[in-house]
Amino acid sequence: MSLPSAPYRFVPLSRLVLLPDWADQASHDQPFADGLCGELHLNLTSHTPLCVGGEQTPSNPHEAGKVHFFRTPERQLAIPGTSLKGMLRNTMEIASFGRFKQVEDQRLGVRDISEANNFYGREIVSSPVQAGWLSFADGQWQIQPCEFSRLHQEQLIRHCNINKDNWTRCGTASKRYALIGLCPPVRFGREPMPKRSNQWLATPRANGEFQGNIVVTGQPGPAFDRGRSAKKYEFIFHDTTHAHLMVSPPVMAGFRQIHDSSDEWSFWLSKLNEGTLDKGIPVFFHKQGEQVKSLGLAMMYKLPYSHSLHDAIRHTHDAHLDNQTPDLADLIFGYLGEEQRSGLRGRVNIGMALLEGDAATEWQAPCILNSPKPTFYPAYVRPDGKGGFRQLMERHSELSGWKRYPVKPFDLQRPEGKAADNNKTQVRLETVEAGASFRFTLRFHNLRRVELGALLWSLDFGGRAELRHGLGMGKPFGLGQVSLHLAGQRLRANNPNEDVTGNPGQYLQACRKEFHDLMQQTLEAAGQSAPWEKCEPIQALLEYARPAQNDATLSYLPEPKDFVALRRTEHLGELTATFHDKAGISPQAGFNSLQPRGYASRFNENLQQAETELQRQAARAALEQSKANATPEEARLMDIRALRDTCAGGSATGTQKDNLARTLNEAHATSMDLDEAQKAELRQLAEACSQIDYKKIQQACKKILRDV
């Protein structure tokens, strides 16, 4: 059995939701005193092949579908601004503890037979399954209950005089009904099934005691004669003498949410609308008392979960959905309120990103791009922390969080097995090559400094140029890894007495610090002592944006049966380590996430600190440039000088001190490659570093002074 593996992970949801207290002041018409207008000129670089979908060609039985790269009317390769907006908004929602609300409310279904005594097994066997005919009359759905007996497929084939190979090739109910007719009548005898209490085995006979209709439900696995585990029986529905049962709207809604997109339900609805069903649609159901509790189109049907996706989000915190105060991303990118004429048009406009220069495109091999289906509850629902899985039957179930695709080397998974022969499920993507560059302009109007800081942080994950966003199609395969670089800006302050043109880089850096202060003050108010960028949700966001090595756990499992096997409780620890290794923020008792929050601005102080930080960045850039032109020995001495200056200041972290000790040890190990002048400099550096109060550094310096 494979270890847990999937190309997605989750940034955990928090019980902390940040709702800015200036929400009712945000406007296009009333300027903020600290507001800014302007433009950011940005470069986008693709690090793996990229496909932003444009014109599409549907698939057919003979050929995979095609998705062309988006193009302007002049046929120039481009990226729509809406795609960039969605990418940045999602990043900002996570970084600013926004509301988790961009989720369609669904009541999912489940059929989990991985363990006999799990929640599904208990629910299905808690009351005997019954059969009946579903119909719509007098404005409501109803079921005519009936008895049912089992019919072996071999007996069915013989009775209907059809070709066995044709039967086994038809895996769906609709195709099998095309062979035998729609629920054909049959006379039969029956006898108790061996080892199955209260179940009957039917044998078609011309003079049989009973009369009913043959009902088939499709073949989910191998043909009936291919092993013990294969489905072998169909059904005969008979004896419809019971009174009708009404199906309540909530029960029918749960059934429809599971089945509305299925081919089988579409087949039955078409027959119902045509008026070709004498008795109705054959279904199985369970009762609670005299009420229909659930129903399905197969005997082991999918059960609707007790709780919807929105219910599970509310189990974390109802502020994610029920409070209409906008979060920070809403204020910047815009939102539509529930009340008439409420909401705010976005104060950020992102233009189309146009390709710069020439870049080759190519058609990738056929692949399968499935829509996200949050049905694998060991991943999508957080475990209970007591040694068991949770799923949406439980009233305390919580969703795992924001789904992200960790960046990884490009590896297009080709369809295997039966999927490789089904062109209708495959698609080919037209991609632009890695290294392609696009340029676009982001215009903003009346943004507060802290809001502009949040936007800047979202562009490059707080100045981390090595991190990457995911954009476009094929992210599970490593496609669409991009980074953004600020190439220029034009700023204008709402306050005419404020000059922002003298050193715009310094000003923008101070805006970043304003956003950092907002988040840090919010965490501290919630009783959290960790630095904002070190808390687990932000660490998860940054981790998934960091280029990974070729990690086998970031691919889809090859077989559906592997997912089934992983649902066993014995794999809880592995699944928790893979999908739930980080936790959301839980504020201290008494903290109210529904209370809008502001922050204490330190802009003048941040402006001064920004100047110092930019000088450090310039020094680091100059050092990197010098190292690029230096020999390995010279580069190592440069590193020691820079780390010595950092550690001698008294504010160095343990990691920085460890890095200095490690670099000194590397210099000692390769000292034979140094010339005499370099050895003399290394001894001088070791003498200076030996004054730093850190045992590892002092030990490394002692070896250098002894041996070099």
Image (spheres, rainbow, N blue to C red):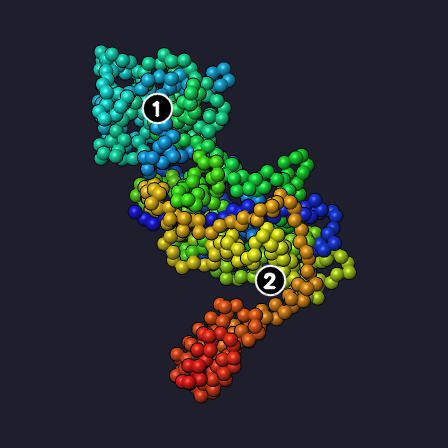
Residue at image mark 2: 487
The residue depicted at 35 percent of the width and 43 percent of the height is 569
Q: Name the foreground residue: 518 vs 633.
A: 518
The residue depicted at 75 percent of the width and 61 percent of the height is 498
Badge 1 amino acid: Pro
The residue depicted at 74 percent of the width and 54 percent of the height is 33
Q: Is residue 581 visible?
A: yes
Outermost right residue? 497
Label 2 residue SS: strand
Badge 2 amino acid: Ala
Q: Which mark is residue 703?
A: none
Q: Position of residue 47 (x, y in %)?
A: 47, 58
Q: Position of residue 262 (x, y in %)?
A: 41, 31
Q: Name the foreground residue: 548 vs 145.
A: 145
Q: Name the foreground residue: 40 vs 298.
A: 298
Res 299 → quadrant: top left
Residue at image mark 1: 128
Residue 609 against residue 205 in the figure, above or below: below
